Image: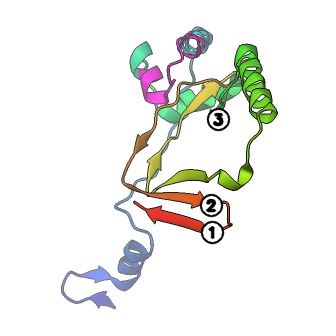
Amino acid sequence: MKYIKYGIPRSTIQYIVTNDLTTSKKGGQKVKLTKGDNRRIQTYVKQSYEKNVKSLLTDIIKGMHLNVSKSTVCRSLKCLNFKYKRLPYIFHLTYGMRQKRLQTARAFIKTAISWNKVIFSDEKLFIVHIWDSYCAWLGKNMSPRRIRHVVRSNGLMIWAMIMPNGLLSYRIM
């Protein structure tokens, strides 16, 4: 029985509805980069690492004038034993900084302090949204390093104070 208005069989309409023909599937062979392109990509990533610059796939494609997709460059980098990692933020103390801190702490301990007159206070900023994702392609012998770039939005500051008698006072700003 044909669909009356358009003269199309019902099975054809069911096929069109179940198999959405508007979305086309990707086909064809995957583009492979030459060995020379792989070497150029490898040196590009190493140079950006030495300059302490992020090496994004789009930057690699534009910087090297490649006519391939991001997934092709990603696949190439994985074959070259690179890994895409989020770089940790680590604050490094030098030997001199540590020695100064020790001297200050020892001098503080040696002084006679009446602890019943000391008030401890601290503050903490709680941020609603923070953007601090710094990822980069790293090779085998590359140690993760970065300069921290943080974009902050509105937040909530809590300041607290502990008095000698054990009472706690706080302010929300």
Q: What stretch is highlighted in magenta?
A: 46-61
Residue contact between numbered discs 3 and 1, judged by CB atoms under 8 Å: no
* Residue 153, horizontal then vertical, whole percent: 37, 50
| In the depicted structure, whether residue 52 falls above or below residue 1 | above
- Image quarter of the C terminus: bottom left
- Main SS class of the magenta portion in the image: helix
Tell me the crowding category of disc 3: few under 14, some 14 to 19, or many 20 or more residues within 10 angstroms, Cα based. Answer: some
Q: Which of marks 2 and 3 is in front?
A: 2
**Residue wearing tag 1:** 167
The CA distance from mark 3 to mark 1 is: 38 Å
Asked where in the image residue 61 lies, by quadrant, the reply is: top left
Which residue type does callout 1 highlight? Leu
Which numbered marker is on residue 163?
2
Q: Residues within 10 Å of mark 2 (few under 14, many from 20)?
A: some
**Residue at 68 percent of width and 24 percent of height:** 92
- Which residue has dot 3 on it? 88
Tell me whether the residue at label 2 lies in contact with that at label 3, contact meaning CB atoms closer than 8 angstroms: no
Residue 64: x percent and y percent?
44, 14
Q: Which residue is drawn at 76% across and 22% down?
A: 103
Q: Which residue lies furthest to the left in this view?
A: 5
User: In what element is the residue under mark 1?
Assistant: loop
* Residue 20 placement, left or right of 135: left
Task: Check disc 3 and report its element: helix, strand or loop.
Answer: loop
